[in-house]
Image: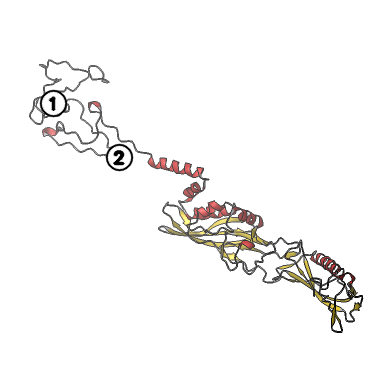
Amino acid sequence: MTDQFGGQFMGYQPNDPAQAYPPVTPPGQPQGGPVPSYGPPSYGATPPPPAPPPGYGPTPVPPPAAEGWAPAAPPSQPGGQPGYGSYPPGPYQGPYGAPPEPPKKKKTGLLIGIIVLVLALIGGGTTAAILLLAAKPQDTVTAYLEAVAGSRTDEALGYLAYPPSDRTFVNDAVLTASSQLGAITEITLADNGVSKQGDYASVTVSYTVGSTPVYQTFNLAKQEDKAWRITDNLPQVNLTDWMLYEVGMTINGVSVDDIEWYTDIPILPGTYRFAINHSLLKLADMKFTVGQSADTSSLPTSDMITLADTAAETLTTAAKAKLTTCLAAKEIDPAGCGFGGIILNDNGVIRTPDLSTIVYSLKSGNIDNPDWKLTLAALEVRASVSLEITISVTDTVGNKWVWKNPNYLNSMTVDISDPTSLTVTFK
C-alpha cells in the first residue's frame, strides 16, 4: 500500500495474508480487535494510521465542535476517502484517534460575581445592595428611599451619583430623629412611572413623610459600574430666618451654632423640628418636611420664641433680689442700680462722703407684678417700673446730707443669655 506521497507502508496489514507481523493490542483496548499499524516515518513525520478500504469498518465521524473551535474539513481523495495525514489543525486529539474533549468553559463571570459579593459584604454590604438593585432604575429609587427611612445614611448616599460633601444634616442620628417625628412610608411606584432612554431614566414615585404626601420624580443615569444612580442633587434648605444663636437651638439634634447664616444646606427627605435648650424660653411647634424640596412654609415668621410659662416668676425674683442688693449698697454709684452718683458740694467745697453712712431707701413703688417683654434679638427681657429712691449720707467732717428730690427708676432689663446667671439692670 502506498501513502498519498507514494511511499510504502511497511506496517502490518490486517487483510494481507502474507503479513508476518501479529497484531498488537494497545493499552486500554480489548484483546483481539483490529489495531492500526505504524510504519516508519515518511519525510520526518509519523504518518497517521490508514483508513480502512471501502466496506471495512465504520465510517469515521468527526468529533463535535467545541465552542470557539471548528476543525477544518480534510481534503477529499479519489473514491471519497479522506486523505492520509489530513488531520485538522489544533490541539492533540487524544490517543488512538479518539476525538478531543471540547475546551471547558471558564466560570470567570461567576467567580468575579462571587468575589465582588464577598468584598461588598466585608465592606458593610452597601456595594452588594447596589449591585443587586442596579438592573432597574426603579429599584434604585425604592432602595434609596427605604435606606433613608431606615436611617442608613451611607447606604442611601451610595445610590446617589453626586453625594453631598456637607453632611451637617446628612447622618444617621438626624435621620433617626426624623423617623421618630414623621417616618417615610407607603413608597409606591407611580403608574407608568418609569421612562428610560439608553443610559438615562426617570422614575416617579409617591411616598408619605409623616402625614404629608409627596409625589416626586427622580432622574437617573447608568454609571460606569453599570449601576443606576440618582443624578439629582439633594434638596437644600436655608434656615437663616429662624436660627437664633445662644439659646441652645437645635434641628433634629444639630446645633444651629455650627451653621452660618445665609447658607444652603443639603438635607435628606424626612421630618425636621427646631428645639431650644433654654429654661426661660418656649419654642413654637416649628416642624417642617422635606420631600422633593424643603417645605418651610409652615414655620412661623414671628413670635416663634416666647417666654416660658414659669419665666415671669423667675425674672421677678431676680429683679427683687437685685433691688435689695442696690438698696443695701455702700457705694456712691452702685452698678446697675440706676441711682447714686453722690456729689457733696458745700458752697463750692466738695466734701467726701463717709460711705458707711450711705442709706438708699425705697420711698414708693414695687416690682411685684411686672409685665415682662422679650426682646429676642438682644436676648433681653424688659419691664416698666415706677420706683422712687431717697438717699442720705454723712460726710467725713460730720455734715449730714439728704436729697430733697428722690431718684426715680422707670425700667428694668434682664439679660437672659445665660439663664443660670441672670443680670438685672435698673434705669
Q: Nearer the viewer, mark 1 or mark 2?
A: 1
From what the image shows, is residue 221 above or below residue 100? below
Tag count: 2
Residue 147, compared with residue 234, is above or below; it is above
Give the x, y percent position of residue 241: 63, 70
Q: Secondary structure at mark 1?
A: loop
Quadrant location of residue 415?
A: bottom right
Cα–Cα span, label 1 and label 2? 34 Å
In the foreground, 259 or 402: 402
- Residue 252 makes an appearance in the image: no
Q: Residues within 10 Å of mark 2 (few under 14, many from 20)?
A: few
Disc 2 on helix, strand or loop? loop
Query: Residue under circle 1?
Result: 41
The image position of residue 344, as x and y in percent, is 85, 79
Query: Residue at point 23% right, 26% down?
Result: 96
Q: Using the image as rendered, state which of residue 197 and residue 335 is in the foreground.
A: 335
Residue kind at label 1, given as amino acid type: Pro
Residue drawn at the location 17% of the way across and 25% of the way down: 56
Q: Position of residue 270 (x, y in %)?
A: 60, 59
The quadrant where residue 258 appears: bottom right
Mark on residue 295?
none
Nearest the camera: 91 or 310?
310
Query: Which of disc 2 and disc 1 is earlier in sequence?
Result: 1
Residue type at the position of mark 2: Glu
Q: Is residue 317 left or right of residue 257?
A: right
In this rendering, the answer to whether 195 lies above or below 117 is below
Above or below, comparing residue 137 to residue 105 in the picture:
below
Is residue 90 among the parts visible in the rendering? Answer: yes
Quadrant housing residue 101: top left
Quarter of the N terminus within the rendering: top left
Which residue in the structure is indicated by mark 2? Answer: 67
